[in-house]
Image (cartoon, grey):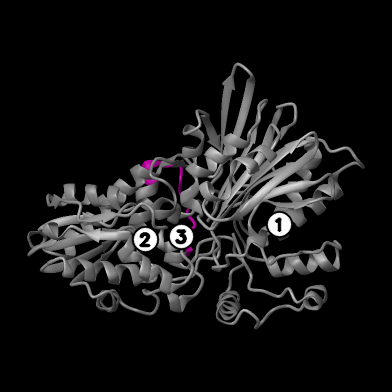
Amino acid sequence: MCGIVGVVSNNPVNQLLYDALLLLQHRGQDAAGIATNHSSMFSMYKANGLVRDVFRTRNMRSLQGNTGIGHCRYPTAGSSSEEEAQPFYVNAPFGITLAHNGNLTNQAQLKEELFRNDRRHINTDSDSEVLLNVLAHEIQEAADGFNLDKDAVFKAVAAVHRRVRGAYAVVSQIAGHGMLAFRDPFGIRPLCLGVNEGEHGTEYLVASESVALEGLGFRFVRDIAPGEAVFIDNDGNMSQQQCAENPSLNPCAFEYVYLARPDSVIDGASVYATRLRMGEYLADKIRKEIPVEEIDVVMPIPDSSRPAAIQLALKLGVEYREGFIKNRYIGRTFIMPGQGMRKKSVRQKLNAIAAEFKDKNVLLVDDSIVRGTTSREIVQMARDAGARKVFFASAAPPVLYPNVYGIDMPTRDELIAHGRTVDEVCKEITADRLVYQDVDALKKAISDVNPALKNFEASCFDGVYVTGDVTPEYLDRQESARHNPKANQVEDPVRTQLNLNTPAVTE
């Protein structure tokens, strides 16, 4: 999961891009970057850190131009190398920059094809650089010499769809021509389009979430469809075309559970409204498994679970209270590399109000349980604060399988629910009772808000990988590489000579 944004305007866009990345900061805290285009020349600055820490006045002044793209990175393999910060740039053909949210499942195959057949060298282990070079090659093949029209751009994107597998939402700039945005044929990662019709003409903004549009005064137009490409040339003319052969909408269910901001609307479904519905369905299940009269109070684990907890308490008729106060200056523990850092940050991040716990049977509601580290620490915090019993409820189903589409759930042995019963997980997190949401209820919570949504990418819950190319053998290779990065690596003679074989990084 990353945050991406692209802007086409008649005015300088550096401030717009910076402000948009601030609104998308929740999608990635590891690195940030901006690339702008001015007189067919690119200016780019990127570094590790939060958006507010990466950019200084001198950096912003250098980012000249009326079009640009931005990115905030979340590394799914725990790398903190600045080499993998985005956007990426390639100088031929024309000069192209690209920012990507998602993960390619056939990265190794593409990398070999680029080296052997396309004569393109990949300098990092980021799948985003692979995707950029595939796009660059296909644009070169589709272009008529130095001429590149919208039909050639769409032809190139269609070729990308035929070659690339996995999840990808993309914003890209082609020097001297315009901005391109497209989404994978399954629509796994979100991407939406907005406009601002002001006195200086029409501005276009493409972003991962609608909150970035609304927060900057843009009017939300629509979500970019699966497989669709949108091209806005340097004169502000917008064209769009479906470039995939059999597109189907399968938005990531975990976006609604945790990743997206509650004030966003993704593929026609309000994230906040879906979380309210998750609370209602979870209340129905809790009523069947825990005597309601035993629950004195319902408390959320801030912040993502708050809407579900409020609606759950309302439906159960149990008092809702805030028992944990969140330190806003500690990063989201889910996207922090390393178990040790996650565990250490929990008590820095949350502090219990002892009076709300003392001598009470408390039902804690969290958005999900992934590794269990945070849940175990929170249960102990509740007991230390004086809770008599601690019940735990998850607004998401058990996370049983790795996510290969851009979320940090890479190996089965890191997932607390994999290979364990609910009672065993309950014992692991030291709760008195544990209740999970059902998979069907989660999907229904989303489709209740937008009935047009019928299918979802929910592989971490149900093991169904919608791209059709993820096999048990693939997962075994991924896990082996995770545990031993140097094992099972395809030898690249150029990279071996340069000693650049490092663990793969996906965005």
Kindly state the secondary structure of the residue where label 1 is placed. helix
Seen at 48% across and 42% down, the residue is 23
Left or right placement of residue 403 versus residue 352 in this view: right
Q: Which residue is mark 3?
A: 458
For the residues bearing labels 2 and 3, Cβ distance under 8 angstroms: yes
Residue 21: where, in percent of width, then height?
A: 54, 44
Q: Residue 215 bears which disc, if any?
A: none
Name the residue at 63% across, 40% down: 60
Mark toward the start of the polypeptide (2 vs 3): 2
Residue 241 appears in the rendering: no
Find the distance from the CA under tag 1 to the CA under tag 3. Answer: 24 Å
- Across and down, in percent, residue 200 comes to 64, 18
Percent position of residue 137, x then y? 82, 54
Mark closer to the observer (1, 2): 1
Of all residues, the one furthest to the right in this rendering is 145
In three-dimensional space, the C-alpha distance between marks 2 and 3, rounded to whole angstroms, equals: 8 Å
Q: Which residue is mark 2?
A: 439
Q: In the figure, is residue 227 to the left or right of 157?
A: left
Of the residues under marks 1 and 3, which one precedes in the sequence? 1
Say which amino acid is labelled 2.
Val
Mark carried by residue 131: 1
Q: Main secondary structure of the magenta part?
A: loop
**Residue at position x 54%, y 55% in the image:** 49
Quadrant housing residue 66: top right
Q: Which amino acid type is marked by label 1?
A: Leu
Question: Which range is magenta?
Answer: 447-459
Q: Of label 1 and label 2, which has the lower sequence position?
A: 1
Image side of residue 453 versus residue 367, left or right: right
Which amino acid type is marked by label 3? Ala
Q: Picture coordinates of residue 448 (x, y %)? A: 36, 44
Mark 2 Cα shell of 10 Å, populated few (<14), some (14-19), many (≥20): some
Q: Secondary structure at mark 3?
A: loop
